[in-house]
Amino acid sequence: MPSTAPADAAQAVATPAVTAQALAGRRAIVTGAARGIGHAIATAFVKNGASVAILDRDEDLGSAAASAMGAAFVAADLGDDADAQAGIDTAIEALGGLDILVNNAGIFRLRPLMEITAEEWDTVQRVNTRSMLSTTQAAARHMIAAGTGGHIINLASMAAKSGGAMEAHYAASKAGVVALTRATAQELGAHGIRANALCPGYILTEMGAATRTEEQVAEWSSRSQLGRCGTPDDVANVALFLAGESSSYMTGQALNVTGGMIMH
């Protein structure tokens, strides 16, 4: 499912896990980190000692976010294959190497199945899935050349496993992310590169804030056994676990962060 908007006072808020510089000395790139889930992940990484570069096409918001958290910023349109790969190369140069790539950038669209055009379908696939191929290829080349392995974390969605009315193109793109993650794990494991996906459920971010109602949030919250929607920090905490050595024997997995809405 898509990310949504800031939690109100009734929502439980997860505090980012800070574990004595768990990522000290690591170099990480987080795409689409100007706001929302990507911003929370980048912030958690910085707080845990990583050197971080964020890639985003919003130069004003992205550079401000990077400056505030102590990260580097690289402007890149991840929907353009050449720009995506060049952005990764620039970020790696700024960091002096790469240990972790978080492919977070994506878009969400709602449209009835019978009204989705070929152009709309291709746009969603290009930004949500094909961009991850471009960034993964660029990052993996550096990781393989360095010979020190690495971690790739791809943001999928609960929609990858549940589908969803009005979002066939989005759900298909996120299912593609899960499949791409598994293929990446299988092919790059020999180089010490792990790849895992995260499947968030209803996460309260800026996306969709203008159209969401209190009644909708309450209905979404009721779908969780925990009685609430998620926050960006809920996802960031799991990303932090995947990026560290505590998950060193995990690869090719698609982990749910859904409050129990999806359990497979």
Image: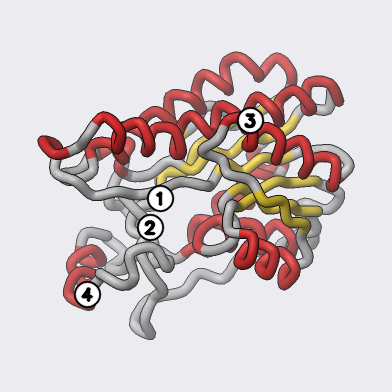
Task: Say the numbered circle drawn on residue 55.
Answer: none
Residue found at the far front of this picture: 119
In this view, the mark in front (1 or 4): 4
| Secondary structure under the numbered disc 3 in the rendered image | helix
Q: Name the residue under label 2.
A: 3
The amino acid pointed to by label 4 is: Thr
x 56%, y 40%: residue = 78
The amino acid pointed to by label 1 is: Pro
Q: Mark 3 points at which residue?
A: 82
Label whose residue precedes the other's in the sequence (1 or 4)? 1
Please rate how many residues cluster around mark 3, counting C-alpha atoms within 10 Å: few if below 14, some from 14 to 19, many from 20: some
Camera-side residue of 100 and 23: 100
Q: Determine whether label 3 and label 1 are within 8 Å by CB.
A: no
| Secondary structure under the numbered disc 2 in the rendered image | loop
The quadrant the C terminus occupies is top left
x 42%, y 66%: residue = 205
x 69%, y 28%: residue = 138
CA gap, disc 1 and disc 4: 20 Å
Q: Determine whether label 1 and label 4 are within 8 Å by CB.
A: no
In this view, the mark in front (3 or 4): 3
Residue 260: percent from the left, percent from the top? 31, 52
Q: Determine whether label 2 and label 1 are within 8 Å by CB.
A: yes
Please rate how many residues cluster around mark 2, counting C-alpha atoms within 10 Å: few if below 14, some from 14 to 19, many from 20: many
Label whose residue precedes the other's in the sequence (3 or 2)? 2
CA gap, disc 4 and disc 2: 14 Å
Label whose residue precedes the other's in the sequence (3 or 4)? 3
Q: Mark 4 points at which residue?
A: 213
Residue 38: percent from the left, percent from the top? 56, 56
Camera-side residue of 234 and 27: 27
Query: Is residue 237 shown above or below 159?
Result: below
Q: Mark 1 points at which residue?
A: 200
